Amino acid sequence: MGVWSALSLLIASLVVLPIVVVVLALLSPTPEVWRHLWATRLPEMLSNTGVLLVGVGLGTLVLGTGLAWLVVSYRFPGRTLFDWLLILPLAMPSYVLAFVFMATLDFAGPVQTALRAWFGSSAWFPEIRSGGGVVVVMSLVFYPYVYLLARAAFHEQAAATFEVARTLGHGRWEAFCRVALPMARPSIVAGLSLVLMEVLTDLGTVRFLNFPTLTDGIFRIWHGMMEREVATELAGLLLLFALAAILLERRLRGRARYYQAGGRGQGITPMRLSGWRGWAATIMCTLVLSVAFLLPVGQLLVWAAGEVTRRTPGALDALYWDFTRNSLVLSGAAAGIAVILAVVLANGVRLSGQRLTRLAARWATMGYVVPGAVIALGVLIPLSALDHVLNDLAGRWWEGAPGLLLTGSIIGLIYAYVVRFMAVAYFSVEASLEKVTPSMEGAARTLGASPGRVLWRIHLPLIRAGMFTGAVLVFVDVMKELPATLLLRPFGYDTLAVRVWQDVSESLWDSAALPALTIVVAGLLPVVLLIRAATLGSRSGPLLHHPNREASNPLHEG
Amino acid sequence: MEPAFAQFTKETGIEVRFTFGKDTELRERLKAEGQYTPADVLFTVDAGNLWLAAEEGLLQSIQSEVLEKNVPAHFRDPENRWFALSLRVRTIMYHPDRVKPEELSTYEALSDPKWKDRMCFRPSTKVYTQALVASLIATHGEEKAREVVEGWVANNPTYIDSDTRILETVAAGGCDVAIVNHYYLARLVNKDPDFPVKPFWANQDDRGVHVNVSGGGVTTYARNVENAIRLLEWLSGPGQNMFADGNFEYPVNPQVEPHPLIAAWGAFKTDTIPVGEFGRLQAAAIKLMDEVGYK
């Protein structure tokens, strides 16, 4: 076994360790609590989880694919702007949109209050604290995953294929359904699977909007009933859901492979939508963008401005800068480390071609479907044991103990982030690594270059875009991450997300607004970079490297 | 908390460093850190949490005449592992235009069908709800407690996971009565003296209104035990108003006057069940609520 495979195996074991720790808890089930769960909450949690998977899946599919096709293949007023503006909701954490909607749209909120003032009653207004509310909120913030990947796939399609379908007598809609959509299916399904993982691990949105799912159940049982074991077992059940989603994805993608022969060509020529149809497209894009991003951000701005003018503690003072700095440090460190590890891992898999290495890589990406709190537990248990060993040894060899080096610092937290978001970095890196022709490597190796040199001189420059995308996505994800942060942050080390959570739990919308807005703005910077990379990259490659399907299924071998 | 700590540091020269977290998470952390924990004191906002921390061996028994004098017996651990420092009264709130106080009496009476579609409750995930139901179990036994909660559920309450939002919904006409911690009303009244919701002290003709606590204890592996005890003592005496008033809570020390805003609501009788019982019965309360379909 070469150095690269060994390195890959080491990284994979480190990443998979916390999940194994949690899975081991499954070996000692707690039957009486399970019986109680079956008789009471579990059916509701399961059906709610199912409702969300289907509802948000359909919602993001329609929104993401529809909008992507609209901006790629039609010309209408504002199209070049919407092309990138529609990515913006990616910067909005779902729990932030949930609390803005809740604060403005529930019975006591300004919208229903105004409706009552005008019409005397608001009884007909839909209840925001419901499954429907969660589906709407999540579809609005998660559709960019599908949008980005579908858009890239539509862009990549050569005009020729589409035009041939048209010349053969298919209408534009028919050509879309029979040629463009099937060819983009792998990308769309990849985006969709990212969405479903987000749905499965969300805590804030379902908690704020009273729609208990399996993830919420893990917290309910762990925090309420003090049954950490059972909570961990429930996490195992959640993994089954994730596995089902992955299998479904494989089925949807099918065995088909689509290749674009020759160069990318010019892409599909957009058709001009004239008159009211053009404006209808503009209005539709504006509507989605306003509801998902512009209006909520406007509301946050109003709240935050109020706090700043009132000089409430935490509003743009030293305290606030502390939260911001902490969030940036954590996100930056986790993004950097995850991408470096992903490169080593992907390179090892590529070089060795062994089943074991491939399998290890797949398992290493498992964290994406495990809720942050469960990973945090998985990190806390082995690291604190290690901390104790370190302290005992230090006490024996030198005087005094160094304290909690791992769990008392941000190391444990960054470890948890890397485990949680490794998949994001890995898929991006791997996808772009796969695009490098083996012949190039062959040539370099024939000329006597070592594998390390090939990675450094040939692959790294070629996969820069993939690494960049991976880092950006991990950065945004960590910025929004809540449960693991709540559990593992060192004493006094609060982040923006933690602050939002605490304030919203107390219904202090005004006070939650500034940190929430900061997360959105920080999330925007990478999105803007992503957009720039997209505009540059439209000549050289796809914008968002979609997860490789083989690797996204850790339990599938073959 | 911050101003109280700052004042304590000013008076004693003892520096206080602190972090906030969810209770379960703080306990898991203390457990994981074991003897290497940097924490000397654990503060938390619910009797159940204090009880559990003690139960899990995270807090040590301490000797302090000052604390025993300042904190009434049913508001502290029998083994002196934790002490309540302020009181949070979870009681019935109503809109005076739609409900007359004479119509209200006890938590139990809210299971009367006349309250159908008129109540706002906090979901069972919230420890406040769990402690209230635990107190019903402690008083009546499980069977009777189940009947009460079944009656609440049959009245089809609106579940809102925020006491503040519940009060705002009562004010806006979304419901007529609710069960809420008193200081949430105090905060709203502090901002708007005309806020149209009134507190009703429940169960005054029998056991008294349900009270939960915030409090703290010295951790088992504390390195600065003496300073930790001094902090607790200071908070139970000279620091009472600073600790309690910031959040409009009632001081645990009967000698100390509450903040004028809540003092204006008058005196009331409190339930004297040892608050540690809420922790012991918490899991039973959750189970009961799950079984009768309390959201």
Image (cartoon, rainbow, N blue to C red):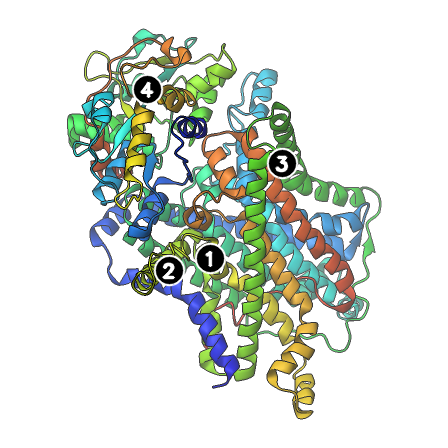
Tell me the residue that label 2 is attached to: A383
Tell me the residue that label 1 is attached to: A411
Q: How far apart are labels 2 and 3 at the CA level?
A: 40 Å
**Looking at the image, which is closer to me, A367 or A294?**
A367
Look at the numbered discs 2 and 3 and tell me whether their residues touch, using CB distance below 8 Å: no
Up/down of B106 relative to A218, above or below: above
Q: Secondary structure at mark 3?
A: helix
CA neighbours of label 2 inside 10 A, class few (<14), some (14 to 19), many (20+) = many
Q: Earlier in the sequence, mark 1 or mark 2?
A: 2
Q: Quadrant of residue A189?
A: bottom right
Q: Secondary structure at mark 1?
A: helix
Q: What chain does mark 1 sit on?
A: A
Tell me the residue that label 3 is attached to: A296
| Front disc: 3 or 4 | 4
CA neighbours of label 4 inside 10 A, class few (<14), some (14 to 19), many (20+) = many
CA neighbours of label 1 inside 10 A, class few (<14), some (14 to 19), many (20+) = some
Residue type highlighted by circle 1: Ile
Q: Position of residue A173 (x, y in %)?
A: 72, 58
Q: Position of residue B191 (x, y in %)?
A: 51, 16
Q: Secondary structure at mark 4?
A: strand
Co-location on one chain, circles 2 and 3: yes
Determine whether, in the image, residue B209 is placed left or right of residue A543: left
Tell me the residue that label 4 is attached to: B251
Q: What chain does mark 2 sit on?
A: A
